[in-house]
Image (cartoon, rainbow, N blue to C red):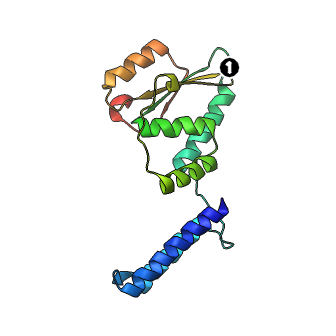
Protein backbone atom coordinates (compact mmCIF):
# COMPACT_ATOMS: atom_id res chain seq x y z
CA UNK A 1 0.00 0.00 0.00
CA UNK A 2 2.81 2.40 0.87
CA UNK A 3 4.41 1.84 -2.54
CA UNK A 4 1.18 2.96 -4.25
CA UNK A 5 1.20 6.17 -2.22
CA UNK A 6 4.91 6.69 -2.88
CA UNK A 7 4.40 6.17 -6.62
CA UNK A 8 1.48 8.58 -6.64
CA UNK A 9 3.49 11.21 -4.74
CA UNK A 10 6.46 10.71 -7.09
CA UNK A 11 4.10 11.19 -10.04
CA UNK A 12 2.78 14.46 -8.56
CA UNK A 13 6.29 15.69 -7.73
CA UNK A 14 7.48 14.91 -11.28
CA UNK A 15 4.49 16.73 -12.74
CA UNK A 16 5.13 19.68 -10.43
CA UNK A 17 8.79 19.83 -11.51
CA UNK A 18 7.87 19.65 -15.22
CA UNK A 19 5.31 22.44 -14.93
CA UNK A 20 7.89 24.71 -13.32
CA UNK A 21 10.44 23.85 -16.04
CA UNK A 22 7.92 24.57 -18.80
CA UNK A 23 6.86 27.83 -17.10
CA UNK A 24 3.22 26.90 -17.79
CA UNK A 25 2.34 27.82 -14.26
CA UNK A 26 4.70 30.59 -13.30
CA UNK A 27 3.04 31.07 -9.94
CA UNK A 28 4.34 27.64 -8.87
CA UNK A 29 7.83 29.10 -8.91
CA UNK A 30 6.81 31.71 -6.36
CA UNK A 31 8.24 31.13 -2.84
CA UNK A 32 4.73 31.32 -1.34
CA UNK A 33 3.51 28.57 -3.68
CA UNK A 34 6.48 26.42 -2.66
CA UNK A 35 5.63 27.06 1.00
CA UNK A 36 1.99 26.09 0.38
CA UNK A 37 3.14 22.89 -1.37
CA UNK A 38 5.40 22.03 1.58
CA UNK A 39 2.63 22.66 4.12
CA UNK A 40 0.22 20.46 2.15
CA UNK A 41 2.82 17.73 1.77
CA UNK A 42 3.61 17.81 5.51
CA UNK A 43 -0.09 17.45 6.35
CA UNK A 44 -0.39 14.37 4.16
CA UNK A 45 2.99 12.70 4.63
CA UNK A 46 4.95 12.02 7.81
CA UNK A 47 8.70 12.86 7.84
CA UNK A 48 9.52 9.23 6.96
CA UNK A 49 7.34 9.49 3.80
CA UNK A 50 4.47 7.43 5.22
CA UNK A 51 0.99 8.60 4.28
CA UNK A 52 -1.03 10.17 7.11
CA UNK A 53 -4.81 10.56 7.13
CA UNK A 54 -6.53 13.23 9.21
CA UNK A 55 -9.90 12.15 10.55
CA UNK A 56 -12.64 14.66 9.80
CA UNK A 57 -13.90 16.39 12.98
CA UNK A 58 -17.51 15.51 12.08
CA UNK A 59 -16.59 11.81 11.83
CA UNK A 60 -14.80 11.95 15.16
CA UNK A 61 -17.82 13.63 16.80
CA UNK A 62 -20.19 11.08 15.20
CA UNK A 63 -18.11 8.14 16.47
CA UNK A 64 -17.97 9.59 19.99
CA UNK A 65 -21.73 10.20 19.93
CA UNK A 66 -22.37 6.63 18.74
CA UNK A 67 -20.20 5.25 21.56
CA UNK A 68 -22.16 7.31 24.08
CA UNK A 69 -25.50 6.15 22.64
CA UNK A 70 -24.35 2.51 22.70
CA UNK A 71 -23.60 2.87 26.41
CA UNK A 72 -27.06 4.36 27.05
CA UNK A 73 -28.92 1.81 24.92
CA UNK A 74 -30.93 -0.87 26.70
CA UNK A 75 -33.45 -3.43 25.45
CA UNK A 76 -36.17 -0.87 26.30
CA UNK A 77 -34.27 2.11 24.79
CA UNK A 78 -32.73 0.88 21.60
CA UNK A 79 -34.09 2.86 18.63
CA UNK A 80 -31.85 5.41 16.94
CA UNK A 81 -32.87 7.63 14.04
CA UNK A 82 -30.13 9.29 12.01
CA UNK A 83 -31.15 11.92 9.47
CA UNK A 84 -28.85 13.17 6.74
CA UNK A 85 -29.04 15.41 3.69
CA UNK A 86 -28.30 13.08 0.76
CA UNK A 87 -27.15 9.65 -0.39
CA UNK A 88 -23.50 10.65 -0.20
CA UNK A 89 -23.87 11.42 3.52
CA UNK A 90 -25.89 8.24 4.01
CA UNK A 91 -23.05 6.20 2.47
CA UNK A 92 -20.61 7.98 4.78
CA UNK A 93 -22.71 7.10 7.84
CA UNK A 94 -23.12 3.47 6.78
CA UNK A 95 -19.37 3.17 6.30
CA UNK A 96 -18.69 4.77 9.70
CA UNK A 97 -21.02 2.22 11.32
CA UNK A 98 -19.04 -0.65 9.76
CA UNK A 99 -15.42 0.54 9.47
CA UNK A 100 -12.89 2.74 11.18
CA UNK A 101 -12.31 6.25 9.79
CA UNK A 102 -8.78 5.29 8.70
CA UNK A 103 -10.10 2.30 6.73
CA UNK A 104 -12.66 4.57 5.04
CA UNK A 105 -10.08 7.22 4.16
CA UNK A 106 -7.73 4.60 2.70
CA UNK A 107 -10.59 3.14 0.66
CA UNK A 108 -11.64 6.59 -0.59
CA UNK A 109 -8.05 7.44 -1.45
CA UNK A 110 -7.71 4.30 -3.57
CA UNK A 111 -11.13 4.81 -5.19
CA UNK A 112 -10.50 8.44 -6.10
CA UNK A 113 -7.21 7.58 -7.75
CA UNK A 114 -8.69 4.65 -9.66
CA UNK A 115 -12.18 5.96 -10.47
CA UNK A 116 -14.55 8.74 -9.42
CA UNK A 117 -17.48 8.26 -7.02
CA UNK A 118 -20.32 6.33 -8.60
CA UNK A 119 -22.96 8.34 -6.74
CA UNK A 120 -25.01 5.25 -5.85
CA UNK A 121 -28.28 5.70 -3.98
CA UNK A 122 -28.81 4.09 -0.58
CA UNK A 123 -31.30 1.24 -0.76
CA UNK A 124 -34.11 0.63 1.75
CA UNK A 125 -32.27 -2.48 2.96
CA UNK A 126 -29.22 -0.38 3.81
CA UNK A 127 -31.31 2.15 5.73
CA UNK A 128 -31.52 -0.21 8.71
CA UNK A 129 -28.67 -1.60 10.80
CA UNK A 130 -28.42 -3.39 14.12
CA UNK A 131 -25.32 -2.99 16.27
CA UNK A 132 -25.42 -4.78 19.61
CA UNK A 133 -28.73 -3.71 21.25
CA UNK A 134 -29.10 -0.65 19.03
CA UNK A 135 -31.53 -0.54 16.09
CA UNK A 136 -30.40 2.17 13.67
CA UNK A 137 -32.71 3.73 11.07
CA UNK A 138 -31.21 6.04 8.45
CA UNK A 139 -33.39 8.70 6.84
CA UNK A 140 -32.20 10.71 3.83
CA UNK A 141 -34.17 13.95 3.49
CA UNK A 142 -32.77 15.02 0.13
CA UNK A 143 -36.15 15.23 -1.64
CA UNK A 144 -38.33 14.59 1.37
CA UNK A 145 -40.53 17.36 2.77
CA UNK A 146 -40.01 18.36 6.39
CA UNK A 147 -43.25 16.71 7.50
CA UNK A 148 -41.82 13.37 6.30
CA UNK A 149 -39.28 13.42 9.14
CA UNK A 150 -41.98 14.46 11.62
CA UNK A 151 -44.14 11.51 10.56
CA UNK A 152 -41.17 9.17 10.81
CA UNK A 153 -40.37 10.37 14.34
CA UNK A 154 -44.03 10.05 15.38
CA UNK A 155 -44.39 6.53 13.92
CA UNK A 156 -41.00 5.22 15.00
CA UNK A 157 -40.74 6.95 18.39
CA UNK A 158 -36.93 6.76 18.49
CA UNK A 159 -35.10 6.90 21.81
CA UNK A 160 -32.19 8.76 20.22
CA UNK A 161 -31.94 11.06 17.19
CA UNK A 162 -28.82 12.23 15.38
CA UNK A 163 -29.13 15.04 12.85
CA UNK A 164 -25.95 14.36 10.87
CA UNK A 165 -26.28 17.54 8.81
CA UNK A 166 -28.22 20.57 9.91
CA UNK A 167 -31.54 21.02 8.15
CA UNK A 168 -33.68 23.75 9.66
CA UNK A 169 -36.89 22.16 8.35
CA UNK A 170 -36.02 18.95 10.18
CA UNK A 171 -35.22 20.73 13.42
CA UNK A 172 -38.42 22.81 13.37
Is 35 placed left or right of 70 in the picture?
Answer: left
For image coordinates 62% across by 36% down, the residue present is: 98
For image coordinates 43% across by 40% down, the residue present is: 88
Q: Visible in this render: residue 30?
A: no
Relative image position of residue 89 (x, y in whole percent):
45, 39
Quadrant assignment for the N terminus? bottom right
In the rendered image, the vertical position of residue 147 relative to residue 69, given as above or below: above
Relative depth, front residue between 131 and 155: 131
Q: Visible in this render: residue 18?
A: yes
Relative depth, front residue between 80 and 51: 51
For image coordinates 50% across by 72% down, the residue present is: 12
The total of numbered circles placed on residues is 1
Q: Quadrant of residue 79?
A: top right
Find disc 1 in the rendering and name its residue.
Answer: 74
Relative image position of residue 123 (x, y in whole percent):
46, 26
Q: Quadrant of residue 2?
A: bottom right
Quadrant assignment for the C terminus? top left
For image coordinates 38% across by 30% down, the residue present is: 171
Relative image position of residue 78 (x, y in whole percent):
61, 20
Relative image position of residue 106 (x, y in whole percent):
59, 52
Q: Quadrant of residue 71?
A: top right
Is 149 placed left or right of 109 in the picture?
Answer: left
In the rendered image, the vertical position of residue 89 relative to residue 147, given as above or below: below
In the rendered image, the vertical position of residue 61 relative to residue 4, given as above or below: above
In the rendered image, the vertical position of residue 12 relative to residue 168, given as above or below: below
Relative depth, front residue between 10 and 55: 10
Would you call the spot at circle 1 few (<14 residues within 10 Å), some (14-19), or many (20 or more)?
few
Q: Label 1: state its secondary structure.
A: loop
Relative depth, front residue between 94 and 158: 94
Amino acid sequence: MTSLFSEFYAFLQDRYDKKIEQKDLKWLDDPQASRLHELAKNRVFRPNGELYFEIFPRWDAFIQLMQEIKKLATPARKKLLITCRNSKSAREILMLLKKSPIEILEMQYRRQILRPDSGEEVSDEESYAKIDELEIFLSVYDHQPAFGVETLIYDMRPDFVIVYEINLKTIR
